[in-house]
Image: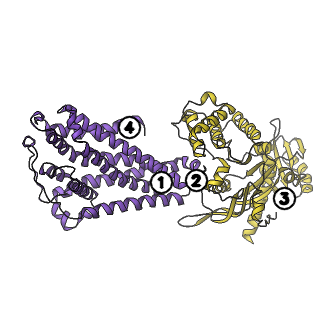
Chain colours: A purple, B yellow
Amino acid sequence: MKPKRVIAGLIMMLFVPLIVFFVTLMNTNFGAISTYSASMLMSFALLPMLYWWMLGLVFTILVSGATSGVIADEVDKGTMLLLVSKPVSRVQIFLGKFLGVFAFGALMSFVGIFLGAWVAVMFTSGNIAHFFGMLPFLLFMFAYGLFVELIFLSISIALSSMMATGRKVLMACLGLVVLTFLVFFMIRRIAPGYYETYSLYWFDIGYHLGNILANAIQVWNILPASTLWQTSFDIYTSAFAGATTATIDTSQGIDLGGLPLAGYVAPVVSLLIWLLIAILLTLFGLYKLKRKEITN
Amino acid sequence: MLREVILVTTEEKIEKYEIWSNNLTKVYEKKENAVMAVNKINLRVLPGIHGFLGPNGAGKTTTINMLIGALSITEGEARIRGLKPGSVAANQLIGFLPQNPQFYKDMTGEEYLIYMGMLGGLSKEEANRRGQELLRSFDMWEERTRQIGKYSGGMKQKIGITAALIHRPKILILDEPTANLDPIGRQNIIDRIKELSSQVSVFISSHILGEIEQMCQVVTMINNGEIVVSDTIKNIKSQFVGNTFLLKTSKDKEILPQLQKDPDIEKAWLTEEEGGEISICIIPKDPEKLQKKIPKLILDNDAILKTFKQPEVTLQDVFMATMAREEKGRGERKHA
């Protein structure tokens, strides 16, 4: 990817989360609370936007964009013909492209998460200790980002092995991203009854990702079980039962409340389903490339 | 013309051929009907420069793409020095330049060669060293830091050939390497190919017969997916000596259509001789009948006869006659 596009991608990733972060915490007196409380408050403020925007809408579009043409455009433009004439197997070609995009996505999410957190901390409290206090959470979100990348990369590369051009693949992936992070999001907010009656959660990638993330945070104690982050996070995922849209009072420190998961699907089932889908799609993409007729 | 009957040889003998195929066939399955692009091709390519001729759509590129593993083989088999086409081992032996090669336009020539060298199994340092050697050898040293997207057609062909040579292949497969080049560019490429033939075998496809005649001693002609003839140029030409005539009159344009409609004429077309003279090239079914007809033709058209002779046969003449015979034979087989 061209450097300008990479920088534009990073700015897009950071822009919205940082604005939401500053608005959420603008009245917080960080001098009056402990380092731990300050780190946790900052993590709570970042989490929803990391899930929905930075590692959600923007990241999945970036990954899809980077992957969409790796096979389709190479075949369409004719450069794949020279590649297959070289002493490298099609498996090696596929893996090389898969790992190349994966590395790019990992780098983007790493820089976005850590740079975003550093900027957020420096422009609010200015206390580097708060940034280090957030490190376990940031590393966890980076691992989560790799999981999201694996899913969308596998979808995109499978489509790229099948479709004629990268543009068509990108359109299909954009449709999926919009469905995941916007359409189902709207259905959950506007018509929760239909969402439950027709079991739409089974098809909602956004719910499954939120389900996995929320459970992992609680099981591994990445963040305290607090309604302060659960209510804002739930706006985007519907992962919790009984979550409200109550205003979060950041001046009160961290409460020790905790909401149960919505329980539509067990988190481990969500994880296994999407891991299996990612693996199968990747293998399918490889199969399609191996059988593809390359012409000029 | 009888088609060659090729016996399948043992593994040991197959390996003596640079390229070998037995009943190599490619059928494209389309929704409504299947298209047979290549039909039972038997190739026997020995070391040296071997020409692969045919008109557009004859099946040359499809055959080559099967040999490099880009297309699957529907029926039959092929071998590159005894190895299966498309395998890593076979591709290690070949260097390939496709028709109208496409490159990564943002890469410089140097970067592209290093990348191709590494794909060919060289280390980065080795690829860099070998790339520099080839860039100098092909007079591309000054252009090495320029992006390939800004190269001329001739430069792109040179980069394509250097990329094909970078991993020291044993066989160079070139699909119409001089297409889209100006005459100087074409001659440069031809000269380089002739120089390279001392180090590698070359299998070159083209429909520009004069160039093939400059480079090759052995050719295989293909039409409608089938081999028409495969032999040395000398042998092929010797079969056609005595059957081609050149006619030059003051009214060639009027006389040509009349010859083309004549049932005793197999084929007639305008051809350019050495020195730029345009004449009518005639392949008669019966040379004696033609020689008797010419005076009447001249008189009926009130033309002036300038030349009527038998020229030295060129590969183009042979090709046109061979294709004409092949088309005729195909028509007869259809009606039978």
Residue indicated by mark 1: A164
Residue indicated by mark 2: A295
* Residue drawn where x is 29% and y is 45% of the image: A139
User: Residue B293, image x and y in percent?
Assistant: 89, 53
Direction top: furthest residue: B142
Mark 2: which amino acid? Thr
> Alpha-carbon neighbours of circle 2 within 10 Å: few (<14), some, or many (≥20)?
some
Q: Tell me the chain of label 4.
A: A
Q: Tell me the chain of label 1.
A: A
Q: Nearer the viewer, mark 3 or mark 2?
A: 2
Q: Are marks 1 and 4 in contact (CB under 8 Å)?
A: no
Give the Cα separation between the discs numbered 1 and 2: 12 Å
Q: Nearer the viewer, residue A191 or B48?
A: B48
Dot 4 lies on which element? helix
Q: Nearer the viewer, mark 1 or mark 4?
A: 4
Residue indicated by mark 4: A5
User: Residue A170, image x and y in percent?
Assistant: 39, 50
Judge if badges 1 and 2 mark residues of a common chain. Answer: yes
User: Residue B71, image x and y in percent?
Assistant: 60, 58
Examine the rendered structure and indicate whether residue A104 appears above or below residue B15.
Answer: above
Q: Nearer the viewer, mark 3 or mark 1?
A: 1
Mark 4: which amino acid? Arg
Q: Are marks 3 and 4 in contact (CB under 8 Å)?
A: no
Examine the rendering and report whether any part of residue B146 can be seen: yes
Mark 1: which amino acid? Ala
Q: Give the number of the disc on residue B264.
A: 3
Give the Cα separation between the discs numbered 3 and 2: 42 Å
